[in-house]
Amino acid sequence: MPEMEQPKKVADRYLKQEVLGQGTYGVVFKATDTKTEQTVAIKKIRLGKQREGVNITALREIKMLKELKHPHIILLIDAFPHKENLHLVFEFMETDLEAVIRDSNIFLSPADIKSYLLMTFKGLAYCHDKWVLHRDMKPNNLLIGVDGQLKLADFGLARIFGSPNRKFTHQVFARWYRAPELLFGAKQYGAAVDVWAVGCIFAELLLRRPFLQGNSDIDQLSKIFAAFGTPKADQWPDVTKLPDYVEYQFVPAPSLRSLFPAVSEDALDLLSKMFTYDPKARISIKQALEHRYFTSAPAPTDPAKLPKPVHKQDGKSSYGKHEAITVLSPPRKLRRVMPERGRVDSLKAHVDKDQQAPMSLDFTILAERPPNRPTITSADRSHLKRKLDLEFQ
Ligand SMILES: Nc1ncnc2c1ncn2[C@@H]1O[C@H](COP(=O)(O)OP(=O)(O)OP(=O)(O)O)[C@@H](O)[C@H]1O
């Protein structure tokens, strides 16, 4: 009989299990933390030989991510280099909101939708309060635990490791959640970009399909204007100053009610405030949390009682099986795109640029006000260097 293969232990601590999937930066696998017996998800990010890519800026960002502690933010438990990869250890989550939305066996009541939104808003409000933007809010970045708790994931990776090239397929779908000021090339943007994205997620929960599905940036703006009307000068006075501004043919706004015929007045009012064109006039996430939508009936469902796909795969596999159903999220595989091997140099370049966050970042710091970044002490610096030197010899 062949000897049983011993499970692989990473960094003398994590027992590797199956691969969960592959994202923009590398593979994610399930593991057991032998120190705590906790199940974790480890994101393995390929650095190649370019360990200098993880510079002090990256260390500062990783440190900041570790300090984001909130019931609705995915916890970064550990970060360490191993072989030619950086490993980020997160708490393990059972499913994500995209799988919920896509599962045609799940009925989402107004109270369920309110519950998912409330958790999303709370997590985002915490980050905005710390002057941290998410910048890539989309349903598959909202992970859901066995207890039904929703947590925001995928902070910071693009900022630390470089932004994925926009030719990558998965970016096409990120576009659907992109605020109009970003599509017009705004370099200075704020928390309002996340509010727009969450508005799109709200709409997607109601419609059970992505709301504004542009197939290019220009088409995305056309879809937005078809839904809300071409912005008039008094609605968004500064739009003409944006770098990529082009004039669009005037289309009047259809009534928001015609787009969301079945929703409550409160939900409609909140949606209209989240889809305000002028980012300065758009509702903030804090104001949104205080909106009467969250206090009026129905009360949000207790997260433990929220409907979830039995297995994560169930939600995903429903795609394509029911062709008559207008669930238009892409098949998972389309979004599993890896950065090319030779891209490490450009990744490093992005890291070095620090504040100049390119368009497709997952996360960034608010441009208007410097955040309270964690101080990197010389002890941190030498600790990292020691770790990297050991691991990359
Ligand atoms: N903390 C986690 N717990 C459980 N599964 C996870 C966790 N983080 C990621 N996954 C799963 O691992 C796979 C890859 O995730 P990853 O975040 O790298 O990419 P993605 O979100 O699918 O795509 P993108 O890189 O475009 O955001 C997905 O199936 C995702 O649901």
Image: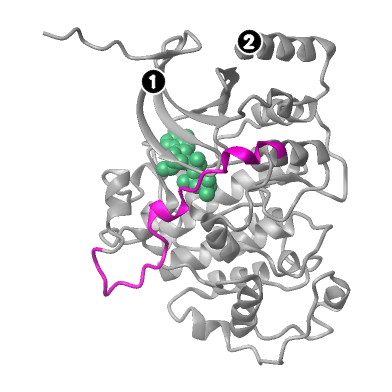
Q: Which residues are magenta?
A: 321-345
The image quarter in which residue 36 lies: top left
x, y percent for residue 162: 69, 42
Q: Is residue 314 visible?
A: yes
Query: Could you tell me what secondary structure mostly forms the magenta stretch?
Result: loop
Residue 46 position (above or below residue 270):
above
Picture quarter with the N terminus? top left
Question: Residue at position x 44%, y 61% from top?
Answer: 298
Q: Which mark is residue 16?
A: 1
Badge 2 amino acid: Gln
Residue 371 position (above or below residue 262):
above
x, y percent for residue 47: 62, 29
Magenta residue check for 163:
no
Q: In this orientation, which residue lies closer to the viewer: 20 or 373? A: 20
x, y percent for residue 25: 56, 39
Magenta residue check for 334:
yes
Badge 1 amino acid: Lys
Instruction: Tell me the residue that label 2 is attached to.
Output: 393
